[in-house]
Image (cartoon, grey):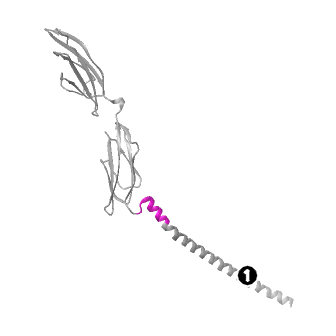
Amino acid sequence: MWQFLKRAAIPLRVAAAIVAAYLGYVFLARLTSDQRWAARQKQAQTAPERESKFAATYGGTALKVLQFYPRESVVTEGQSTLICYGVLNAKSLRIDPPVGSVYPALNRCVEVQPEHDTKYTLTAEGTDGTTATAAFTVAVKPDVANLPRITSFEVVKHSQELGRHYFTIAFSFENARTVTIDPPAFSPIEDSAPFGQFIVEPETTTTYTLTVIGKKGRKAQKQLTVEVPKG
């Protein structure tokens, strides 16, 4: 009898192992299915939240100017700066005054070199025909080192002949291309040496104004009063 039970115990143990394995498989399968369902539920719940955050940040599918600014809002004459822009859902855009090649992008910069205070305006157009704009101004300040200046303006000689007084006036300047005098004593001088002189014969005391103009159109002036002796 003992030997029979002993021989019969082998298949029972195998059957118990098979049953245990099956129950474990069902448990794990159900657990995995529950996890997948929970993940889908979580995804379904967070999708609207993600869409809401996207819409709040980037405007959803609407046309939007994300950014439009200069690297420096004030530059010195002759220097350049960068204009940076970003647009969303735009089919085309332009910047006025023109700054070269521009096209819709989320983040892009172009170089500009304004000669004077300049207002830049970005206009973007969406696929539905709507437009969005943004603008700013870049100020241009003079380059002090290159400003036109008059370094001297004086009478260097005075003579008298036949009752008339003759005065030789000399001048010198820097960073200028054009020189004029008022009252007129010579024609405007263009691109000359940075010095010169002229002779005047005023009948009465006269104040002369020397004007020099730089290549950027900036001016410098200086006055000189020539006194004519009486008698």
Residue depicted at x 28% and y 21% = 172
In-front residue for pair 98/50: 50
Specify whether 111 is left or right of 209.
Answer: right
Residue farthest to the front?
230
In-front residue for pair 220/92: 220
Magenta stretch, main secondary structure class: helix
Residue farthest to the left?
162
Q: Position of residue 200 (x, y in %)?
A: 18, 17
In-front residue for pair 76/136: 136
Instruction: Return the residue at label 1.
Output: 17
Q: Quadrant of the C terminus?
A: top left
Residue depicted at x 25% and y 18% = 170
> Picture quarter containing residue 133?
bottom left
Disc 1 residue crowd, few under 14, some 14–19, many 20+, Cα 10 Å = few
Which amino acid lies under the numbered mark 1 shown in the image of this protein?
Ala
Magenta stretch: give its range.
49-60
> Picture quarter containing residue 25?
bottom right
Question: Residue 198 magenta-drawn?
Answer: no
Question: Residue 55 magenta-drawn?
Answer: yes
